[in-house]
């Protein structure tokens, strides 16, 4: 046995036909007794359909769906790793760059699903599997909603309370932006080491989800990039229309947030006279050509902010070499810094 959830039990197994290990998910026998048997079986079948349609490297692959002695089962890709829930229990919190790298993959997977009309509706730590190198797989599309499906009635609350969107919590219709709220709730917990909407009961949690704002990450996590906190805050907006328009847009904002240098955002705009200094060779020998070459190289690692950084560094650099050295200090990762400096023109 690998795990146990609300709907089923997961076992490691062996497929003798193609000689590979797989994961087998079985519905709890107790759920197959009574009037709701057909609904549970149909939801299980829908997990296979949703996941099979969402072919993506960050989504657990579904190999087969079948019935055995009246019990439904799924044969799935066996993932070597642990759940995000287990990682949070062990680590407490993640470094911002690791958290962004992980949740960027989650958003990439969700974007793939959303593009074909599938909303996961249960994004939570237990459904995010971590492999070596912080590679990610999302699992359990068991309560996902197809745009064309009428199986889930409006007014029925489906999901895990701590990570549900306000509209989902109130039993209203949901779309892809509901998954973005849930993703942000998981990301918040990864960064802060605590859930954004804690509570002792589902009623207390639901009230906070609908009526209260999560504590600002800048007040909870010392030294966090304000841009990163702003991305999470926007994705946790109570109204879906105030969140990001898509998983792709949220992923791009997340990745860009770590490249923003806070000091640059707060720096005053340079006086107009500075344009003259940049436009023609300076007395100390740093020419516009030097600046343009440095900006082009730096933009590969920091994006549009490179223009601002180069303009500011040109005012202080005593030579082309000093200019490149100063700009290299703005690049976070050593490998990227080295690659940037290798592009420096020879004297």
Image (cartoon, grey):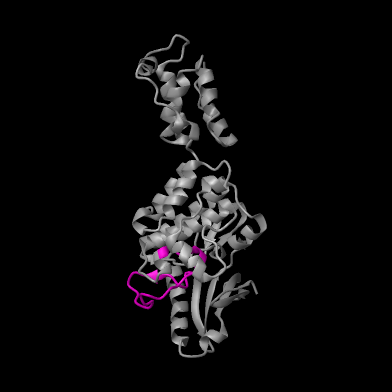
Which of the 4 image quarters holds residue 283? top left
- Relative image position of residue 287 (x, y in whole percent): 42, 15
Residue 54 appears in the picture as rendered: yes
Q: Residue furthest top?
A: 283
The answer to whether 81 appears left or right of 60 in the picture is right
Q: Residue at x 44, y 33 (%)?
A: 265
- Relative image position of residue 268 (x, y in whole percent): 42, 26
Judging depth in this view, the residue of 177 and 47 nearest the camera is 177
Q: Is residue 145 magenta?
A: yes
Q: Residue at x 49, y 46 (%)?
A: 229
On screen, residue 288 above or below 221: above
Judging depth in this view, the residue of 145 and 76 nearest the camera is 145
Judging depth in this view, the residue of 237 and 141 nearest the camera is 237
On screen, residue 261 above or below 324: below
Q: Is residue 50 magenta?
A: no
Q: Residue furthest right?
A: 90
- Relative image position of residue 245 (x, y in whole percent): 35, 54
Q: Residue at x 53, y 19 (%)?
A: 321
The answer to whether 293 appears left or right of 79 in the picture is left
Q: Which residues are magenta?
A: 141-166
- Relative image position of residue 277 (x, y in whole percent): 39, 15
């Amino acid at each position: 046995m690998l795990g146990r959830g609300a709907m089923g039990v997961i076992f490691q197994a062996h497929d003798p036909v193609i000689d590979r290990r797989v994961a087998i998910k079985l519905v709890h026998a107790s759920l197959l007794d009574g009037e709701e048997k057909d609904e549970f079986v149909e939801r299980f079948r829908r997990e296979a359909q949703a996941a099979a349609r969402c072919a993506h490297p960050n989504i657990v692959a579904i190999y087969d769906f079948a019935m055995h002695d009246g019990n439904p089962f799924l044969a799935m890709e066996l993932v070597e790793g642990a759940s995000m829930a287990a990682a949070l229990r062990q680590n407490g919190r993640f470094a911002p760059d690791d958290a962004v790298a992980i949740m960027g993959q989650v958003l990439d997977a969700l974007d793939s699903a959303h593009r074909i009309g599938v909303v996961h509706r249960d994004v939570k730590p237990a459904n995010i599997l971590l492999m070596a190198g912080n590679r990610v797989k999302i699992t359990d599309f068991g309560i996902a909603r197809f745009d064309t499906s009428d199986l889930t009635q409006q007014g029925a609350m489906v999901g895990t309370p701590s990570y549900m969107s306000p509209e989902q919590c109130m039993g209203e219709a949901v779309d892809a932006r509901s998954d973005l709220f849930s993703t942000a709730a998981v990301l918040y917990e990864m960064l802060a080491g605590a859930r954004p909407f804690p509570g002792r009961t589902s009623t207390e949690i639901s009230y906070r989800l609908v009526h209260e704002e999560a504590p600002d990450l800048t007040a909870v996590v010392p030294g966090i990039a304000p841009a990163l906190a702003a991305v999470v805050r926007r994705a946790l907006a109570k109204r879906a229309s105030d969140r990001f328009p898509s998983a792709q847009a949220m992923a791009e904002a997340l990745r860009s947030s770590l490249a923003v240098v806070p000091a640059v955002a707060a720096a005053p705009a340079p006086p107009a006279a500075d344009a003259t200094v940049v436009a023609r060779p300076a007395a100390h020998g740093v020419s516009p050509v030097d600046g343009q070459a440095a900006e082009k190289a730096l933009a590969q690692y920091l994006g549009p902010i490179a223009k601002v950084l180069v303009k500011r560094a040109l005012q202080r650099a005593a030579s082309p070499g000093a200019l490149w050295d100063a700009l290299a200090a703005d690049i976070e990762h050593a490998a990227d810094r080295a690659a940037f400096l290798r592009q420096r023109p020879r004297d």
